[in-house]
Image (spheres, rainbow, N blue to C red):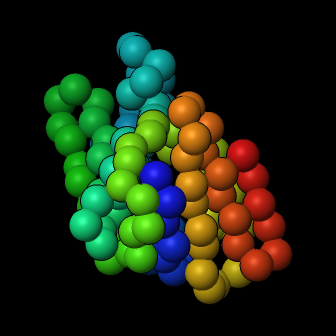
Amino acid sequence: MKVALLQENLAKALNHVAKAISTRPSIPVLSNVLIEAKKGKLKLSSTDLEIGINAWIGADVEEDGEVTVSARLLSEFINSLKSGKVMMSSVKNTLLVESVDNSAE
């Protein structure tokens, strides 16, 4: 997966899907957000097994793919960034998030 999008759009979508994430999930993967990049859109999904929330963001998708990542960690990192372009790429089970001033893996 390889995607570029605006920080403010990603932060808004993460805050939206976070509403379906339990603070104490019975299954650890339920604290994650599923990120799917496909056909010019980024889809974020979360669930607590009772409700599920999806959010779609327009993005510059260079390479399709999907990955799950801790919703809390990703949201905290994205919210700490300045407004502007964010690049995300995944290789196997690792997500690399970069902006002009910061990067995290």
Q: State the residue at coordinates (70%, 72%).
A: 99
Image coordinates for residue 75, horizontal then vertical, percent = 57, 55
The residue at the far front in this view is 63
Task: State the residue in front, 69 or 87.
Answer: 87
Q: State the residue at coordinates (28%, 36%).
A: 47
Image coordinates for residue 77, horizontal then vertical, percent = 68, 57
Task: State the residue in front, 96 or 77.
Answer: 96
Question: In the picture provided, is 97 more to the left or to the right than 37?
Answer: right
The answer to whether residue 11 shows anywhere in this view is yes
Task: State the residue in front, 29 or 39.
Answer: 39
Question: In the picture provided, is 93 more to the left or to the right than 67?
Answer: right
The answer to whether residue 75 shows anywhere in this view is no
Q: State the residue at coordinates (40%, 15%).
A: 27
Image coordinates for residue 53, horizontal then vertical, percent = 23, 49
Question: In the picture provided, is 78 more to the left or to the right than 18?
Answer: right
Image coordinates for residue 62, horizontal then vertical, percent = 44, 67
The residue at the far top in this view is 26
Q: State the residue at coordinates (54%, 33%).
A: 92
Q: Is residue 44 above or below residue 22?
A: below
Q: Quadrant of residue 102?
A: bottom right
